[in-house]
Amino acid sequence: MHFHFPFTIIEILWTLTFAAQLVLLVVLLGRERLRRFPWFTASIVILALRALAARVLFHRVPELTFSTIFITLADVGMLLGLLVLAEMARIGFRGVRRAVWIAATVVALAIAGVVMAYWGAWPAWKQLTANSRLAALMLMQLAAQKGQLLLGVLSIELGVLVLLFGRRYHAGWRTHVQRIVIGLSTAALAELTVSGVWEIIVKHVVPKSREQYEHILDLRDKITNANSAVYLLVLIWWIAILWMDEPGAARSAQALPPVKKDFIETPTDSIATTEASPGPQSS
């Protein structure tokens, strides 16, 4: 007797990932992390909305409509991802001189720009400048793809900077900023690795039969599932570390001086004082 499992690996990973995103949002709101990390919270909202739209609308709306919605959310998510990196860098390296900030930003963008220029193919300029809705979608998709590549390289660079110099500023060990950046760089490294491996396979492996072609597609699915599993682990990591307070915050709360009762007027004290005081004398 063979046991039939009705769900595929892709469906299981999607369900767990979407549930983890919702739990992470609950933690961000419930533990009051929203005020400190607003752009990070917004990025998780967009990623969850994108995953839900891809699941609900696929094969249920016209293909062009689905592509427009999905690519638009991808562009918004990419822009929010850049704002998240700026948010983490601003908090983690607060107090760094402006000249150092500018120099580090220029160097990081230069390295990421070189990688973005030589990684992956670029479409023909005529296709992007054609006066049609399809050309506009292609331009938006190119912005999402190349922007995601830029975001991944910048995430890895920021992760290296945080690990090397974060302790000297405000991104030391066990801080929320450092652990969020570690998650971002881990997810980016996994995604870039998957993209690089698949690009090598496409360029150098030519299927000579139907079986080889299906084997390549099966390998692509396994690589994609591995990347999704890494992202799921990152989400679980963020849930755990953002649920806990930073060690410095706990020590600061314990170090607060006790409030003297003499300077507090409770409602009971006010009522007692009012009852004890003499009323106005009638003449």
Image (cartoon, helix red, strand yellow):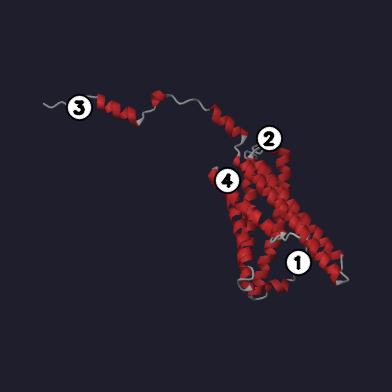
Measured Cα–Cα span from mark 3 to mark 2: 64 Å
Q: Characterize the local packing of mark 2: few (<14), some (14-19) or many (20 or more) Cα atoms within 10 angstroms.
A: few
Residue for point 60% across, 41% down: 243
Residue for point 66% across, 47% down: 236
Measured Cα–Cα span from mark 3 to mark 4: 54 Å
Q: Is residue 255 above or below residue 195?
A: above
Which amino acid type corresponds to the residue marked 3 in the rendered image?
Answer: Gly
Residue 105 visible in the snapshot: no
Between residue 45 and residue 210, name the one nearer to us.
Answer: 210
Q: Are marks 1 and 3 in contact (CB under 8 Å)?
A: no
Q: Characterize the local packing of mark 3: few (<14), some (14-19) or many (20 or more) Cα atoms within 10 angstroms.
A: few
Q: Are marks 3 and 2 in contact (CB under 8 Å)?
A: no
**Residue 279 bears which disc, if any?**
3
**Residue 27 bears which disc, if any?**
4
Indicate which disc, 1 or 4, sits on the residue closer to the N terminus: 4
Residue 253 visible in the snapshot: yes
Measured Cα–Cα span from mark 1 to mark 4: 40 Å
Q: Nearer the viewer, mark 1 or mark 4?
A: 4
Q: Looking at the figure, which quarter contains the C terminus?
A: top left
**Residue 168 bears which disc, if any?**
2
